[in-house]
Image (tube, rainbow, N blue to C red):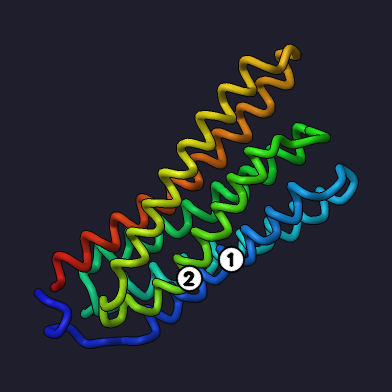
Amino acid sequence: MGLFNRRKDESFFELLTEIAGNLITGTNLLSRLVKSDLDQRDGLRDELHVVENHSDDLTHAFMNKVNQSFITPLDRDDMSQIAYRLDDCMDLTDEAATLIVVYQVDTLTEDILKQVEILEKCAELTAEAMPRLKTLSELKEYWVEINRLENQADRIYMRALSAIVNQISDPIQVIKLKDITERLEEACDAYEHLAALVEGIAIKES
């Protein structure tokens, strides 16, 4: 069933847009956290966790709406997957912040800071894209740019991983930094998975 055979309930897209907006807030807090001194990180992590909890509440409200609606603007499973993948992006951002705080790494690598910068860009692009799901128009630039950023993030991740395992002698420090950079890479991957889902929906509904 194509898009124009379904009733367009804008509240679905408003909820997705609000969830995506929290990604901007969350990644901004993560960016502040990685640039902060150790004694400031706990508070920023707590602020981010509040944002993550709010996103969980919005996701539950969205899923309830999907499950209780006889007709949804897009395929029911597709809408559910969008919400779940937005949630993955937020969860992984929150987990990365938690690792940084728990591990108490005083100085984070330049590559880790660059990973976070890419996450900020991905969050902004995603938040801009969600309202366009209503018409499924002007979305190609979104998934192309997310893919480009994820490829850039892959290169940074491999460089970061090589530097961590080959240039750091303390094995505990290696484990800590490796865990953090891997979690940030997983967050970048989550944005790409979401963009690929949106691309597939747009093609299917066209």
Identity of the residue drawn at 78% across and 49% down? 35
Residue 71 place in picture, x, y as percent: 21, 80
Q: Nearer the viewer, residue 66 or 197?
A: 197
Identity of the residue drawn at 69% across and 39% down? 110
How far apart are the two marked residues, 2 and 1, measured between alpha carbons?
7 Å
Residue identified by numbered label 1: 24
Quarter of the image where the N terminus is located? bottom left
Total marks in image: 2
Residue 125 place in picture, x, y as percent: 46, 66
Which residue is at the far right?
A: 39
Residue identified by numbered label 2: 127
Mark 2: amino acid:
Ala
Identity of the residue drawn at 37% across and 65% down? 142
Disc 2 residue crowd, few under 14, some 14–19, many 20+, Cα 10 Å: many
Asked which quadrant contains residue 159, the reply is top right
Identity of the residue drawn at 61% across and 59% down? 52
Disc 1 residue crowd, few under 14, some 14–19, many 20+, Cα 10 Å: many
Is there CB contact under 8 Å for labels 2 and 1? Answer: yes
- Drawn side of residue 204 relative to residue 89, left or right: left
Mark 1: amino acid:
Ile
Residue 37 place in picture, x, y as percent: 87, 46
